[in-house]
Image (cartoon, rainbow, N blue to C red):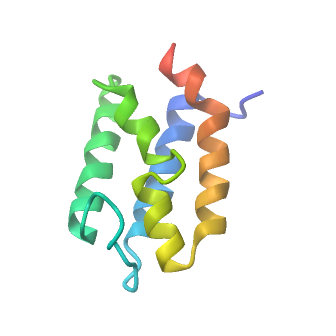
Amino acid sequence: MFTQDPGKEMLQILQAVIFLLSRPDNDFTWSSWGNQQNAIEYVSAIIDELRSGHISDFTKLAVLFAPTGPIQEVSINSGWIEEFMQLADKFDRIKYTLQYS
């Protein structure tokens, strides 16, 4: 059961992702973003969509947390895979509720 609104919980997850992607020693070599600025802009755009109450393409949100997705690639190369896995577990727990609400 959810402790809060799934949309708010997803915002918290994505804000945590931005915090992790903002770390100065991150390695974006294997991510599709190529660099920190692109990564933060991409996730920020999804946050903006979520705040507006509409996600135009849920797939792009799901891809972020997929195995070998861009966040996981950065997390592996940058030493925070455990933190990513915790966020991915939270994402998996609420994604269907958010997608079909």
Query: Compared with residue 93, is residue 33 higher up or lower down, i.e. above or below?
Result: below
The furthest residue to the bottom? 25
Q: Is residue 4 above or below residue 25?
A: above
How far from the left and from the top, in percent, is residue 27?
38, 78
Q: How many marks?
A: 0
Q: Residue furthest top?
A: 100
Q: Residue at x 56, y 79 (%)?
A: 79
Image x and y of residue 87, in percent: 60, 53
Q: Does residue 85 sit above or below 21 in this rendering?
A: above
Up/down of 53 relative to 72, above or below: above
Asked if residue 37 lies left or right of residue 5, the reply is: left
Q: Is residue 77 left or right of residue 55?
A: right
Percent from the top left, x then y, of residue 44? 29, 50
Give the farthest residue toward the right: 1
Q: Residue at x 44, y 54 (%)?
A: 15
Is residue 74 or residue 91 the one in the foreground? Answer: 74
Q: Nearer the viewer, residue 42 or 71?
A: 71
Residue 92 position by quadrant: top right
- Using residue 42 as the reference point, say whether residue 67 is left or right of it: right
Q: Position of residue 99 (x, y in %)?
A: 49, 20
Q: Nearer the viewer, residue 52 or 56?
A: 56
Picture quarter with the N terminus:
top right
Q: Is residue 99 left or right of residue 27?
A: right
Q: Residue at x 50, y 46 (%)?
A: 65
Residue at image coords 43%, 68%: 74
